Amino acid sequence: MDIKEVLEKFAIDGNIDSVNAFGNGHINKSYKVITDTGEKYLFQSINGYAFKNVDDLMRNIYIVTSYLKAEGFETLEIVKTKNRKLYFKDDNTFYRVYKYVRKSITYEKLESPELVVKAAKAFGQLHRALEGLDSVLVAETIKDFHNTPKRFENLMSAITEDPCDRLKDTDGLMGFVFTNRPYLRLIQEALDSGEIPERIVHNDPKINNVLFDRETNEIRCVIDLDTVMPGSCLYDFGDALRSIFTGDNESNRDTSVMKVDLNIYELYVKGYLESMNGSITKKEIELMPASIAVLALELGIRFLEDYIRGDKYFKITFEDENLVRAQGQFALAKDVIANLPKLKAITKKYID
Ligand code: GN1
Ligand code: MG
């Protein structure tokens, strides 16, 4: 089936005028669709390699978006198929449609302090809002998604198998991972021991997943809800800052641009804590600085594993892109670790 035939299966308004590739996701394929009645939609094919259970995935999104809407938040709106299903399956490919969030804009890089504070508040607000949603309703769409020690084990198996004979290209990186192994367990151990609470979180708070209003720059909503599931708020805190510090190109060979900005860190901490409004625990705050290192190391490990396995998970546009991405995340992790005393000193000001 071609794209237009698939789109016909959905309850969209009007006839299709245009379909254009859209966005920068590494996993799903996205298209912006415009119809002759002026309606706009986001049409996506879901990556079945990453997401093994599309029923659970779409039900999660349905539950979370219905809940957020009922709580008065703007959020994604699923457009069902004509048979009132949440997705359409053709030939082992899964498709879905959302209403396009009009007059919104995303940024690959946050240029101004105001935007950093707003992004921090967007995730704080989301965490607060989801406190009221029973976590048994939300399925684990990707098992052990942010279980960093498990990610390390997966990398070890990839090295052992070395199916594409690529281990030889990874000189220097493996040593870096081994040296910094103690960081990998920080969040997982705190969760397992109950030192920090389990919360429903976004799990993929890349900064281009925050929609701002095109005219006022106010927060509209957080998108890409595929991985909303139980976890730790430190996953989102660490990953959002990881993404901000990485800059606008995760595949940049010049890794010197991927570094900590202490001012941005403080703005984000302030914005996030303000909107979490007393709900966050002391232990969670204490782990905030290191969480950025954990998330950067984790993503570096994931990119490296995927490179070694032959680029099965993350989309690539050039041959060694996943290796380059891993190098970038490890360079950032190194800078975060070097700056931990400063990051901790800033954070301390907010623990009373
Ligand atoms: C993937 O597709 P995208 O860009 O929203 C990935 C995240 C990574 C991110 C790195 C489901 O997100 O975990 O942090 O790439 N999402 C999934 O760019 O694996
Ligand atoms: Mg994503």
Image: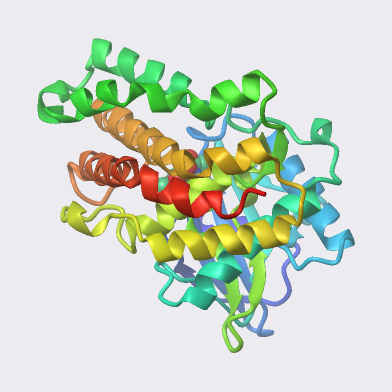
Residue 249, above or below 219:
above
Tell whether 111 sits left or right of 135.
Answer: left
Q: For residue 233, which quarter of the picture? A: top right
Which residue extends farthest bottom? 215
- Residue 229 seen from this side: yes
- Residue 28 seen from this side: no
Nearer the observer, 21 or 124: 124
Residue 258, above or below 113:
above
Q: Residue at x 21, y 44 (%)?
A: 324
Residue 347 on image: x %, y %: 52, 51
Q: For residue 226, which quarter of the picture? A: top right
Tell whether 281 sits left or right of 210.
Answer: right
Q: Residue at x 54, y 49 (%)?
A: 348
Residue 315 on image: x %, y %: 35, 45
Q: How is the image coloured?
A: rainbow
Q: Residue at x 72, y 68 (%)?
A: 12
Image label count = 0
Nearer the observer, 130 or 95: 130
Residue 169 on image: x %, y %: 11, 29
Tell whether 137 sits left or right of 265.
Answer: right
Q: For residue 156, which quarter of the picture? A: top left
Which residue extends farthest top? 160
Residue 272 on image: x %, y %: 62, 58
Q: Residue at x 31, y 53 (%)?
A: 250
Tell whether 35 sits left or right of 70.
Answer: left
